[in-house]
Image: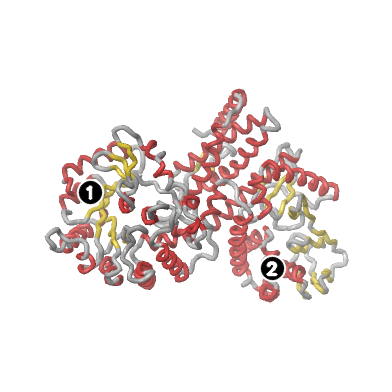
Amino acid sequence: MHIVLHGGEPLLAGRARLARIMAELRGRLDALCDLDLRVHTNGVLLDDAFLDVFAEHRVLVGISLDGDRIANDRHRRYADGRSSYERVIRAVELLRRRRDLYAGLLCTMDVANDPLAVYRALCELDPPRIDFLLPHATWDAPPPRPTETAYADWLIRIFDAWIEEGARVPVRMFESILRTSRGESSLTESLGLEPADLVVIETDGAYEQADSLKVAFDGAPSTGLNVVTDDLDTVAAHTGILARQEGLGGLCDTCRACPVVESCGGGLYAHRYRTGSAFANPSVYSADLLKLITHVRHRIAMPTHALPYDTIEALAAGYGGDDDMQHLLAGQRTLRRGLLAGVHTHHSAAEGWDLLTRLDAEHRPAVDAVLDHPYVREWAARCLTGGGSPGYLANIAAAAAVKAGVDTEITLQDVDGVFHLPTLGAFEAARGTDARLLVKDERFTLAGTPDAVWHPVRKLRANGFEVILEDTDPHRHCHGHQTAGRLSEEEAGAWQRAFADAWSLIESDHPHYAAGLRGALSTVVPLTPPPVGGDASSAARHAFGSVAIALPKDAATLALLLMHEFQHVKLGAVLDMVDLYDRQHAGLYYAPWRPDLRPLEGLLQGTYAHLAVSDFWRVRRSTVAGQSDVQFALWRKHTADAIESLDTSRALTPLGLRFLAGMRRSAEPWLAEPVPREAIDAAAELAERHRAASGAE
């Protein structure tokens, strides 16, 4: 929880009163939450005695300072016209000597000031952070504007200097633009699409919305609520507060169509106001924000692929459509190409690399089609850790040549007795045999191995959806289960029938999951059924687009396993692109789907997968009651509990917390759905039995 004692000027309350307030806040809240307690002041009254009080109660101090003397004296003078600059600088110098209390400097922009003089004056004071604040304004009362984008131009000069000097002082506005451009959270309410979580408590006990709303019209921040009669839950339900929880959906059409909306977020809410349309407008600074954000993105080598706000929200809910899958696939393509670049330096990869680079220059779609095969990354990752055969790069290049229809001849790598061509199939031959692949007139043959048997990949098809039934790739043995060998025609036929029925069920009962599966599931690997019975399924961390499954007893179970494992596939790709948790976190957690305690990523992966499991049984019980009710009651509770474990781990990043909030929004309503009492009791017994067997407290 963040609490800031603000103003007016909070130091006018005096040391004794501030000490009582801070002691009360610490005494009541420290045991309940991580309390970040701060005071923001103009610094005029700040002295060592105040700082002693703040040190005692662990309070950080921020100072308002608008730059050099000329800049600061434009607006921060005493009533009699005297400059306050020297006293503010003295206060900052006190904080520099007590750096553990120094929060940073807040500068309100004035485009009449020299931006570089302002920036350098602030940097000379060695602040932990600098905030730049756009002057409060609305469409009814616009800011002074000598040129159309004066505020962007002012900030761009500072940004360029900031970059050229190594960004040595964190600047919240610039960091927020960079973070939101990567799909991460903003550090300020004036940028980004995160819900606002701010309430103001006035000295008379009135709850108000953000202070900045005062610029819109008289009484704009008012809620009509008071600490004496109302709690914060009531405040959170106020229409004004709720209006700032909608993210992209709360913006006007112009903002929603803007190319930088993930970073701009419509700008500060107060700055959107116009008589007649209220806050349903772009920011009065919209042209400035567009220019600034575009400049930042062009100036910095941003990651090739970022996850848009809508994609993060869709995936966090457990779903994701074709467009969202394309963002994940684009990231995987870049990752795979990077891994191949690391493999090609091995001498045995030279011939394959030469062919692949030539094909990539003229037939990139064919190369992409082969590199998209899930187990190309698995092979490359093994090579880079010393466990793979770099010469297999020739097989990858050969498959791309076949797809491109380019005549070539190349020596293939034998892997476990097969010459595999990813996405096409494999020649089975005696182990250790040398073989040259000849590609001519869109046909291919294996020279020097007259006894080689060709096993083409088979496809599973259903209602226009097609995936590879992969039983030839020698790199598919990465799923922690025994993979099946080459299937007989009868076995392949059984898979086709089950897949068609399972896909029909997914499309009819779970269309939100079907869209993502159709967009990115490319491969199914058959597993050997477990000897003790039951089901077996897996997703491999380096095999985006593939799931491995032992053919279950019925199509409904196959549908469940496809949905379950594909959740792991999606989340793995998200984790390749963004950090959702602190990777140094070493805690272990109870996971109700495992017999052992799990690291945080394992808990996150399992929880995300069981969103789909819970949803499957939620829908399934409408047609098959009884055991479906028990399964729904069991997994909805387990999933909700795991979400809370993740939340209390304190190891999630801000983006991770946002992702978790999306998961919670999907799972929470399921807890209110009616379930027969006997099903709830049976689920509770199963849950207790599992926890007892796991040894978890």
Q: Nearer the viewer, mark 2 or mark 1?
A: 2
For label 2, count other residues whose C-alpha is less than 10 Å away and answer few (under 14), some (14-19) or many (20+).
some
Residue 373 at what x, y percent from top left? 69, 60
When asked about the image quadrant of residue 508, the answer is top right
Report the residue at 42% width, 52% height from top: 277
| Residue furthest top as drawn | 678
Tell me, yes or no, if residue 514 can be seen here.
yes
Report the residue at 83% width, 48% height from top: 493
Residue 436 at what x, y percent from top left? 79, 72
With 383 as the anchor, is 440 left or right in this view?
A: right
Q: How is the image coloured?
A: secondary structure
With 666 as the anchor, is 12 left or right in this view?
A: left
With 7 as the anchor, is 360 left or right in this view?
A: right
- Judge by depth and name the residue closer to the eye, 561 or 120: 120
| Residue bearing the label numbered 2 | 365
Type of amino acid under label 2: Pro
Q: Is there CB contact under 8 Å for labels 2 and 1?
A: no
| Residue bearing the label numbered 1 | 55
